[in-house]
Amino acid sequence: MSRVSALAHLEAMEAMEAMPLTRFRHRHLSDRPLVVIPLTMAGEAGTPLAVLVGESRRSSTLLVVGQPRNRDQRFAFAAEFGRIVMGYIDSCRQDRLEIPSRGEERRSRYTSAPQILVPNNGGIKALSDLGRMCRFRRTDGPYPVPAVVPELGKWLTFLVETAEQAGTSMLLPMTGLLGEHWATGQSALEDQNLASLMAWISPPDGLTVQEAMADAENPELCPPAGPATSPQFDNTYLAPAMRRFDTARATGNEQALAEAQADLRGLLSEQLNPTWRLMWTALALLRGVDEAPRAAARFERDCDSFTDYSDYQDSGDARPQPKRDGAIRAARRLSRLERALADFEADMAFDDPYVRADQRSLGEAFAGTVVAAEPDRVDITASNRRVPRPRVTVRTLDPVRLVDDTKLISPTMPPGHKAEIVSIVRDGDASLIMVEVTGGMGRARVPRPGTVPVVEQHIDYLPDPGWRPTPVFPEADQIPWTHAGDPEDSETMDPVAAGQAATEEWGDDN
């Protein structure tokens, strides 16, 4: 945690009010997101109990598994949930836009992408478990399931994998969205409780933050925002309701079964509805924050990713994601995640002065006043060409930890401005940083007006993430035996192995 972030949390604690960490909202919010609140049994990892899902505050669907240990009921639940999710995904696959590209090949992408919102990171884990348990299931042979079940599993796994990539917006935890923009006076673990986090940011009318937090910690007033239920609720209410359901089902008493189902739905509805209201309240708060300029470009990359995976699923070669990544796939994935994180952090700092101040406190960016300038300086390249290379000296009080030759970009200069650190000299409590302007001046021999900083101008600089080539990884037959792994680790899994994986993950018990 940087000094600025730590200070924001301390100020929030002193004022008992959430403090903004960013000037903008750095995630794109869809006009029509799908809110999903999954619920699992406490102590039963990965076992679905219920889900509340919908596209608007006034229109929600509650799906309940009467007995989560029963295979048929589990997959009936997965099929119902799958029809809702796939209907939403299909609604995003309506319009495609031609993308200008070099060469003869023409590309297109969907103009929209799905956006699923869950309460917290635990909700993403619940969807990950459900996806893993569904994507290997067969639609024929022993223990067949509806075709939508494995389709749901593959799409949930795709969305969960994209959620691990910084800057994406297709699957987001609400606590993460709120935590990116506001600092509270509680710990990061407590911030995973949506009710507690909202108590800091927007306490209910007539309540102080302390009173709202006390209510948020009361499971009777604010049931856990998922995915696991409260053990007290399980023992006092849920277990007896399930026993009544099992007894009515075993005796074949239709009236008793209907009453037991209604009781169970009522109990779980009471558990999920407070979180449902909090989700839409939080969404309204986030819509009131201006979207960062570069968020739209990141959402276009989401549309590209969505289009590519959708086209792959429509092809005849589509297979479920492997249970475990092989060495090459894991290395590619790690490289992609690292690059996405670097790009997202750079975009946030470029767009947002609050984030930039955070980086300045760490010495990873600097801002100051130009105290000297050589606007007419010219350099001679290796090909004997004369090119403008103005130099300016910036005086800053920031703790600079950058090194010579670091490439820079500036949000306070015109687009395309690029520079490079020539030298850094200490001057008492300040630093004198000589910067050479290398780009964004136009193609003429004389830089365009306004493209070179002038004396007494205030300017911000941060490292340029730049472009880097995609790493080249070895072929599968060139991997050392120490990293080859099992056949199940490969990027394609044969049907027999897939069936065995499904049985292991989510047994075929009744």
Image (cartoon, helix red, strand yellow):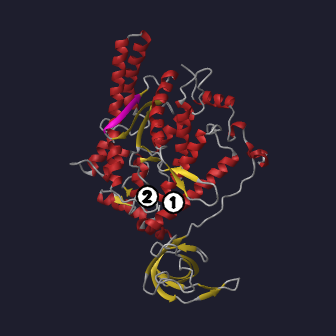
Q: Is residue 121 visible?
A: yes
Task: Work out how far the residue at label 2 is from the one at label 1, CA to CA, in angstroms.
Answer: 9 Å
Q: What residue is at 35 percent from the left and 47 percent from the top?
A: 196
Please tell me whether residue 59 belongs to the stretch shown in magenta.
Answer: yes
Q: What is the magenta segment's predominant secondary structure? A: strand
Q: Which mark is residue 7?
A: none
Above or below, 114 against 405 in this view is above
Q: What residue is at 39 percent from the left and 64 percent from the top?
A: 7
| SS type, badge 2 | loop
Q: Residues within 10 Å of mark 2 (few under 14, many from 20)?
A: many
Q: Which residue is mark 1?
A: 344
Residue 250 position by quadrant: top left
- Mark 2 or 1 closer to N-term? 2
Most foreground residue, 471 or 378: 378
The x, y position of residue 495, in whole percent, is 67, 30
The x, y position of residue 409, in whole percent, is 52, 72
Q: Is residue 41 visible?
A: no
Q: Are marks 2 and 1 in contact (CB under 8 Å)?
A: yes
Most foreground residue, 426 or 343: 343
The kind of residue on which mark 1 rests is: Phe
The x, y position of residue 135, in whole percent, is 58, 34
Q: Which residue is mark 2?
A: 26
Q: Residues within 10 Å of mark 1 (few under 14, many from 20)?
A: many
| SS type, badge 1 | helix
Above or below, 270 against 178 in this view is above
Farthest residue to the front: give it. Answer: 104
Residue 442 placement, left or right of 34: right
Most foreground residue, 472 or 312: 312
The kind of residue on which mark 2 rests is: His
Q: What residue is at 47 percent from the left and 71 percent from the top?
A: 360
What segment is highlighted magenta in the picture? 58-63
